[in-house]
Amino acid sequence: MTSSIPSDKEKPHYAPAMEALARLFARMDADYERAAQSHGFVCRGCDDNCCRTRFYHHTLVEYLYLRQGLKALPDSDRARIEARAAQTVAGLADGGRGPSSEATLCPLNAQGRCILYAHRPMICRLHGIPHQLQRPDGRRQAGPGCGDFDRQCGVSSPPLLDRTPLYSALVELERDLRRRLGFPDKIRMTIAQMVVEKLALPDGGETP
């Protein structure tokens, strides 16, 4: 059975932003891979798994993109992820005392792999290797690599990944999407919250 390609009328009104974000993510992946190869770093997974790190995500465009990927999953996979995400969110509300330690894993992690790898947010793509960033005030700051990076390449490895143009492109994409949708609210969500919580769009459109 083949699936039909949605017509332009069937596509969500924010589809151009999703396509632009996919191109930006491909650029991020390429920049990360070049820097990782220059360092000689290979991520094979470790006990300091970044999927156990509580990252917060702040953009509407990444939220919509992740939920677009979630919607495309088979019903059984989506239901399993939503159940795990709900358990994780409940644990956050309970101060981490509720669910088991296994629930601290990102709900998208399935047997050590991200089930929505192509739709994962920016920080999941760029985390792990040293980076530099030019702030709006002109000052530059540097960030370290992860523990596995330090073991492989050394703590003093210089940052070869410049996140500045990638952040700037994401900011522009987010600003344009929010303007088009009339969405003013701030976002601060974990992956689990992005899976569980369905945001309402001001123009009456539905999120995936």
Image: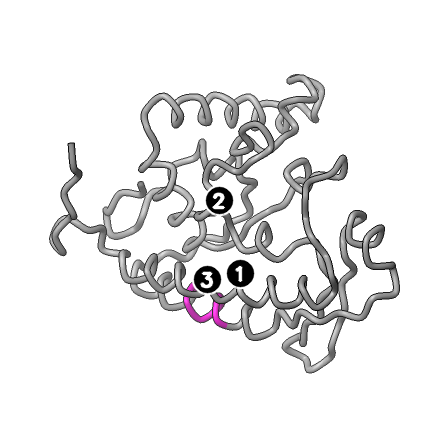
Question: Relative to residue 119, is residue 83 depicted above or below?
Answer: above
Q: Toward the viewer: 11 or 94?
A: 11
Q: CA distance from mark 2 to mark 3?
A: 12 Å
Instruction: Please say whether residue 172 is one of the residues in the magenta stretch.
Output: yes
Q: Quadrant of the C terminus?
A: top left
**Residue stretch in magenta:** 169-174
Asked whether the residues under the numbered discs 3 and 1 touch, taking CB atoms below 8 Å apart as contact, a structural biologist would say yes
Report x, y in % for residue 175. 42, 67
> In the rendering, which numbered label is found on residue 26?
3
Q: Secondary structure at mark 3?
A: helix
Question: Relative to residue 15, is residue 163 depicted above or below?
Answer: below
Report x, y in % for residue 205. 24, 47
Count of marks overlaid on the render: 3
- Residue identifier under label 1: 29
Residue found 46% across the figure and 27% down from its top: 81
Few, some or many residues within 10 Å of mark 2 (<14, 14–19, 20+): some
Report x, y in % for residue 198. 38, 37
Report x, y in % for residue 5. 16, 47
